Amino acid sequence: MTAPMKPFLLSLALLIAAPVCSQEQRVSEATVRELLEVSDARNLVQNMYAQLDGMLDQTFKQALRGKVMNPEQEKLSAEMRASVIALMQEQMSWEKLEPVYIKMYADTFTQSDVEGILKFYQTPSGQAMLKKMPLLMQNVMQSMMELTQGLMPRLQPLLEDYTRRIVDAGQ
């Protein structure tokens, strides 16, 4: 092999190896499980059901526009909410969600990402964020529902008009 050829081959080998070396290590399942444990993901899922119950209750009360439910309506509302939550818990149990979480985290983050997130969650600020996030999300959802209600009077006629026009255009 000639002397000028050696640097060329060395450069070529480095170029080929560079992408392999620069790729971050794929996150391990054990690290994701640790993150889910530190972030109390299982409990957050359980709390989601209680929040859903409250949101459903609020939705019914808003639909009644200030009218008080009679005892039969209260009973039916409670039964419906319980049925919805039971179905959600059955279909979205932690045993079914955990593998999904693990895959999503592994597909989204690198090992160093998850390690950094773990370090943050183990700080007082990280713990405060984890504890307050459900309340934040509940408040965001409530605000979104209120904004959507204000939008509905304007959105309804628009949707009806376009639906009619689309149907008419097909005849």
Image (cartoon, rainbow, N blue to C red):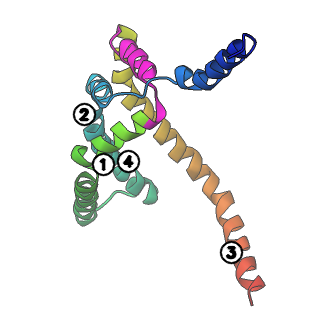
Label drawn at residue 41: none
Q: Which residue is mark 1?
A: 53
Please name which of the two marks, 3 or 4, marks the residue nearer to the observer: 3
Q: Is residue 12 left or right of residue 41?
A: right
Q: Residue 127 is drawn in which quadrant?
A: top left
Q: Nearer the viewer, residue 62 or 122?
A: 122
Q: Which residue is mark 4?
A: 55
Q: Main secondary structure of the magenta part?
A: helix
Q: Which residue is mark 2?
A: 43
Instruction: Say which quadrant the N terminus sits in.
Output: top right
Characterize the local packing of mark 3: few (<14), some (14-19) or many (20 or more) Cα atoms within 10 angstroms.
few
Find numbered disc 2 in the image and state the secondary structure of the residue it sits on: helix
Mark 3: amino acid: Thr
Q: How far apart are the alpha carbons under marks 3 and 1?
A: 33 Å
Q: Which residue is mark 3?
A: 163
Residue 39 coordinates in the image, percent (x, y): 31, 25
The magenta-colored residue range is 107-123
Residue 134 coordinates in the image, percent (x, y): 37, 31
- Up-down relation of residue 131 to residue 105 (above or below): above
**Mark 3 vs 2, N-terminal side:** 2
Q: How far apart are the alpha carbons under marks 1 and 4?
A: 5 Å
**Mark 3 vs 1, N-terminal side:** 1
Q: Can residue 109 be seen from the camera position used here? A: yes
Find numbered disc 3 in the image and state the secondary structure of the residue it sits on: helix
Q: Can residue 138 be seen from the camera position used here? A: no
- Up-down relation of residue 46 to residue 153 (above or below): above
**Mark 4 vs 2, N-terminal side:** 2
